[in-house]
């Protein structure tokens, strides 16, 4: 069975998040209805900086090639 999902693991908090891959006939993302929310929030700015490191590790899992990445996120507020 192929689950075709992305798995994010947080070692510090011992939590994980799974998100399924979108599968449509032409490999496009499904359409999303626009939000009807009209409220505008004001405040500061948050700058997010992502550092992505590919460790080079590869492994065949469930018929797909999995690769190990290290993602670091730095959030700065103004």
Image (cartoon, rainbow, N blue to C red):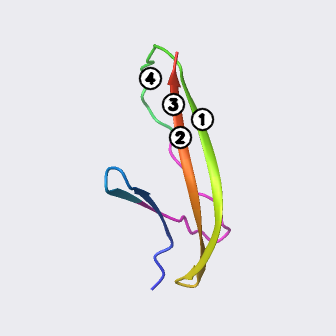
User: Was residue 51 drawn as part of the magenta stretch in this picture?
Assistant: no
Q: Earlier in the sequence, mark 3 or mark 4?
A: 4
User: Image check: 70 left or right of 11?
Assistant: right
Q: CA distance from mark 3 to mark 4?
A: 26 Å
Kindly identify which numbered label has been placed on residue 23.
none
Query: In what element is the residue under mark 3?
Result: strand
Nearer-the-camera pick, 71 or 7: 71
Q: From the image, tell me which residue sits under label 1.
A: 49
Q: Which residue in the protein does label 2 denote?
A: 73
Q: Which residues are magenta?
A: 18-33
Q: Give me the residue at 53% from left, 35% from top.
A: 74
Residue 59 percent coordinates (x, y): 59, 79
Magenta segment: does it hold 21? yes
Q: Relative to residue 54, is residue 46 drawn left or right?
A: left
Number of numbered labels in the structure image: 4
Question: Is residue 37 in view from this perspective?
Answer: yes
In contact (CB < 8 Å): disc 1 and disc 2: yes
Q: Is residue 19 above or below residue 44?
A: below
């Amino acid at each position: 069975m192929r689950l075709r999902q992305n798995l994010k693991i947080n070692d510090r908090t011992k939590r994980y998040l799974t998100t399924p891959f979108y599968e449509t006939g032409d490999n496009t993302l499904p359409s999303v209805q626009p939000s009807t929310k009209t409220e505008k929030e004001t405040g500061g700015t948050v700058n997010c900086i992502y550092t992505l490191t590919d460790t080079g590790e590869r492994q065949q899992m469930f018929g797909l090639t999995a690769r190990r990445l290290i993602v670091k996120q730095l959030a700065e507020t103004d």
